[in-house]
Amino acid sequence: MRRNKIQPMEIAQAALSALFVIALLTLLRACGPKEDGTWMHCHSAWKAVVILAAVMLVLSAAKLGLRQPAASAAIDIAVIVLAAVTTLIPGNIVSMCMMHTMRCWSVLRPGVIVFCVLILLAAALDIASLCRAKKGNG
Amino acid sequence: MNFANYLARKNIKRKPARTAALVLLAAFLSLSIFGGSVIIASLRNGLASYEARLGADIVAVPSQARSKGTFESILLQGIPGMFYMDEQYYEKIRDIEGVEIAAPQFFLASASASCCSVSVQIIGFDPELDFTVQPWIRESYADELGDGDVIVGCEVTAPDDGIITFYGMDCHVVAQLDKTGTGLDTAVYANMNTIRALIENAQRLNFTAFDEIDPDHAVSAVMIKVADGYDVETVVNDINIHVRRIEAAQAANMISGISAGLSGVSHIVGLLTGMIWVLAIVILVIAFAMIAHERAREFAILRVMGASQNMLSRLLLTESALISVIGAAIGLVLAALVVLPFSGLIQTRLELPYLMPNAGMIAALAAGALVLAVLAGSLTSAVSAYRISKHDAGLSLREGA
C-alpha cells in the first residue's frame, strides 16, 4: 500500500540530518590548524563525518518524495547503517588528537554520537511504523 | 485491556498536538532531575578523587606559582605549567620539625605533542621518596618505572606503537592511569632520570625556557607528610616563616576552596531543577484541569452509558500516567544524550574536578528520575480526577444544552 502523506518520522529524520550538517559546519567543527598552517589528524575525521552526514541528508530528503514503503524502508536501513558507521569515524576508524580534552574529543565526537543516535532512532521508528501499517493492511 | 485503558490510549492519539505538548512538559521533569543529579554526583566524585590524588598533608611550591594560580591550574584544569626552585629550599623544608616525608616533584611542559599544537604536562617524581603518585600508579602498573618509561593519564591517547616523543626523545608508554576527573588526567609521569634526560635534550635543541634550570638541582613542588603528633597548620606556618620564597598550604584548604565552588554549582543546578519542576507541574495541573473541564459533556455521556465515577477518574489518571511515562522516558534519553557524551566539555567549562559515576549509579539515578517524574506527572491530574468523580452528569448535560 502506498503512503499517502509524509510521515512525522520522515520529517524528523530529514530535519535532524539537516541540523547535523549545519552543526558540523558550525558548532561541531574539529580543532583548528596548527601554527604552521597544517591540519591535525582530527581534521580528516571531521571531513569524513561531513561527507557521510551530507549523504544521510540527501537520502532523508529523497525519502520525503517517496510513496513506496519498500523504497522508504530500504533508505531507512541505509541511513541506519550510515549513522552507525559515522559514530565510529571520530577516534576509532580515523584517529584524532592525542589529548582527550581537545575540541575534537570533547565537542566533535560526542556531537556526532548524539546526532547519529537520534537519526538512527528516527529511521528505526519509521521502519516500525511501515511494518505496523503493512500488518494493518495485511 | 480494560475499557478505561483503551479509551485513554484513544484519547491520547486523538489530540496529537496536545499530547505532544504534555509529553514535552513531562520530559522536562525527568530531564532536569536526571541531568542535574548526574552533574552533582560527578562533581562530588571529582572532589573525592581530587582529595585522594593530592595525598599529601601539605604542598609547598615557589611563591610565584601559588600567586599566579599555576599549581591549581595544573591540578584542576590540566593547563601545563613549569616553575622551579633550587633544591636548597627542598632541603630546608625537609629539616623543618614535624615533616615526616618530603617528596619532591618536577613539573615540565612539553613544547608540543607529536600530533598537535598543545603542550603536555610531564610530572617527574622520586620513586624512593614519593608517596602520592606511586600508590595511584600501582593501581595500573606494578613494576618499577624505568628510565625512559612514562605512564600517561587517561585523557592522553597512548600511541599504537607505545612511543611518545618529547623534545626529540622517545619515551616508552608502559601504562595508562584510571580516570580521576582532575587536570592530572592529561599529565604524563616519569622518574627524575627521565626528566633530566628530557631537559638535557631540550637544552641541546636550544629551547631557551630551560637555560636557567639545572635539572640536577631543581624541584617544582614538595609533597609533605606530617609526622604523627604534629599539627598540620603549625608545620605549614613553620615552613612559611623559615623557608623564604616558598608558599606552603594545607591540602585540606585547597580542597575546601574547591568544595565551596562545588557547593555553588550544586546550588545553582538544584535551583534550576526546582524551578523547572514547579513550572512544569503547575502547567500540567492547569492543563489537566482544562482538559477535564472541556470534556465534561463527554464524561457525562459516559456516565449515562453506564460508566462508574471511579472509571472516569481512572480514565484521566491513566491518560496522565501514559503521558508521564512517555515524557519521562524521552526526557531521560535527552538528558543522557547531553550529560554522558559531553562530560568532558562539562568538566572543561566548570573548571572543577568532575568524575562521572559508574554505570550502576547512573542507572539508579535514571530509575529514580523516571519514577519521580512519572509519579509527579500522574498526580497532576489527581485533583481533576477527583472532581470528575463527584460531578453530576445530568448537570453537565443540561449545561451543554
Image: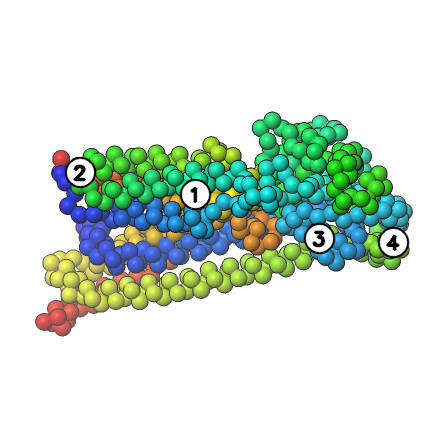
Specify the label residue B243 is tagged with: 4
Q: Is residue B7 above or below residue B102?
A: below
Q: CA distance from mark 2 to mark 4?
A: 83 Å
Q: Chain of mark 1?
A: A
In the structure shown, which secondary structural element does the residue marked by tag 3 occupy?
helix
Q: Is residue B28 above or below residue A83?
A: below
Q: Amino acid at mark 4?
A: Val
What percent of the width, then of the height, locates residue B281? 37, 63
Q: Amino acid at mark 3?
A: Thr
Specify the label residue B70 is tagged with: 3
Kindly identify the residue that appears in the image at 51 percent across and 34 percent down. Answer: A95
Crowding near pointer 1: few (<14 within 10 Å), some, many (20+)?
Answer: many
What percent of the width, then of the height, locates residue B247? 80, 55
Query: Mark 3 or 4, which is nearer the eye?
Result: 3
Crowding near pointer 4: few (<14 within 10 Å), some, many (20+)?
Answer: some
Query: Which residue is denoted by mark 2 in the rendering?
Result: A68
Query: Which residue is denoted by mark 1 in the rendering?
Result: A112
Kindly identify the residue that appears in the image at 13 percent across and 73 percent down. Answer: B399
- Earlier-in-chain disc, 1 versus 2: 2
Q: Chain of mark 4?
A: B
Q: Amino acid at mark 1?
A: Val
Q: Are marks 1 and 2 on the same chain?
A: yes
The quarter holding residue B263 reads bottom right
Q: How many marks?
A: 4
Q: Amino acid at mark 2?
A: Gln
In the structure shown, which secondary structural element does the residue marked by tag 4 occupy?
loop
Query: Mark 1 or 4, which is nearer the eye?
Result: 1
Q: CA distance from mark 3 to mark 2?
A: 64 Å
Does the image show residue B90? no
Q: Are marks 3 and 2 on the same chain?
A: no
Q: CA distance from mark 3 to mark 1?
A: 34 Å
